[in-house]
Amino acid sequence: MVVPEALKPNHENRGRIVISWLDASGATKFGTELAEFFIRRIPLADVTSKNKTSMANKRAALNEMFRQIDKFKIEHRMNFYKKAKLGNAFKWMLLEAGYNSEIIDDLTKEILLKL
């Protein structure tokens, strides 16, 4: 029995699929970029501030972050491994910058749900 070439298993492509599935460098980079954006737009001193200007700035920054996430989601296929790497990069950068872990956890969850 002759098997047509198109129906033969392609083991070379299978290896590429596994490698691309595990390549989370783009997601990690984006998580770091999101954290840098957050740090620039919402300084540590402003995180818990309740004044109107600060609240408006936080709301605008978060809306912009969510817009960036929507764009990234459209351009990249995200599996659970890549989402975890993105979330970890974001979370650890903010922890190292001194932000409150409770706020970071909530924000990281929101980001991951958005993906």
Image (spheres, rainbow, N blue to C red):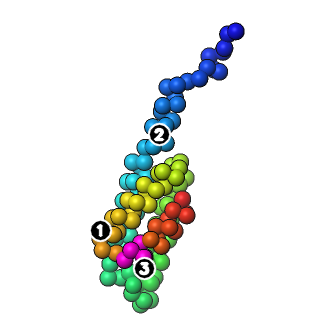
Q: Would you name the residue on which mark 1 appears?
A: 96
Element marked by disc 1: helix
**Quarter of the picture holding the N terminus:** top right
Which residue type carries mark 3? Asn
**For residue 102: magenta?**
yes
Identify the main secondary structure in magenta.
Answer: helix
Mark seen at residue 106: none
- The location of residue 14, given as percent across then percent down, is 52, 31
**What crowding class fits label 1: few (fewer than 14 Cα within 10 Å), some (14-19), or many (20 or more)?**
few
Which residue type carries mark 2? Ser
> Which of the marked residues, 2 or 1, is nearer the chain's N terminus?
2
Tell me what residue is drawn at x 38 percent, y 59 percent: 89
Element marked by disc 3: helix
> Which of the marked residues, 1 or 3, is nearer the chain's N terminus?
3
**What crowding class fits label 2: few (fewer than 14 Cα within 10 Å), some (14-19), or many (20 or more)?**
few
The segment highlighted magenta reads 100-104
Q: CA distance from mark 2 to mark 1?
A: 29 Å
Mark seen at residue 20: 2
- The location of residue 11, given as percent across then percent down, is 52, 25
**Quarter of the picture holding the C terminus:** bottom right
Which residue type carries mark 1? Glu
Q: Is residue 31 above or below residue 55?
A: above
Q: Is residue 3 visible?
A: yes
Q: Is residue 33 visible?
A: no
Q: CA distance from mark 3 to mark 2?
A: 38 Å
Q: Would you name the residue on which mark 3 appears?
A: 57
